[in-house]
Amino acid sequence: MKLLFYFSFLILTGMVFNSYGQEQKYPKQDVSITAQRKKQERNYYRKSLGVDSVKAAQVSQVQNAYKAALNIIVADTSLNEAARRTRISALMEVKNQKLRGLLSPAQQEKIIPGTERLPAKAIKQL
């Protein structure tokens, strides 16, 4: 009888800890968290740049596309360091060109990092 209680206790303990360690998934909550994060990003850009909601959404879209493309480049193991740097530089330039089309120079200074802001190249005059 003691042996039966002992094994029952072990089985119940194992079941409790097994179910405790499993990750719970709530898809509706994940969607709402994503939507909330996007709204917070738009509000951040709207307030920090002093733009309307439409332009803030466009800036957010440019930034999110940049982050997604950057993650793909970083995850690509077939690239060597030089190729990776070249692709990242090209990606930064595309992002910055899009932001220059959307924002004024003062707003660009707030959002484009100083390391990515290159001075305009001097035009050689003959």
Image (cartoon, grey):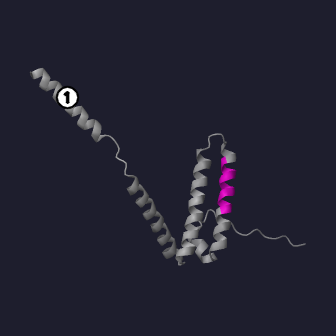
Task: Determine the residue positioned at 41% across, 60% down.
Answer: 32
Which residue is nearer to you in this view: 80 or 3? 3
Q: Residue furthest left?
A: 1
| Label 1: which secondary element | helix
Magenta region: 84-94
Residue 117 appears anywhere in the view: no
Q: Nearer the viewer, residue 106 or 73?
A: 73
Seen in the picture, residue 61 relative to 103 is either above or below; the reply is above
What's the residue type where badge 1 is placed?
Leu
**In this view of the protein, can residue 90 be seen by the observer?**
yes
What residue do we see at 55% from left, 66% from top?
60
In this view, the residue farthest toward the front is 28
Q: Is residue 126 left or right of residue 34?
A: right
Coordinates of residue 62 in the picture (x, y in percent): 60, 64
Tell me where residue 8 appears, x and y as whole percent: 17, 28
The N terminus, quarter of image: top left
* Residue 90 among magenta residues: yes
Please tell me how crowded label 1 is: few (under 14), some (14-19), or many (20+) other residues with Cα within 10 Å: few
Q: Main secondary structure of the magenta part?
A: helix
Q: Is residue 91 magenta?
A: yes
Name the residue at 29% across, 36% down. 18
Q: Residue furthest right?
A: 126
Residue pointed to by mark 1: 10
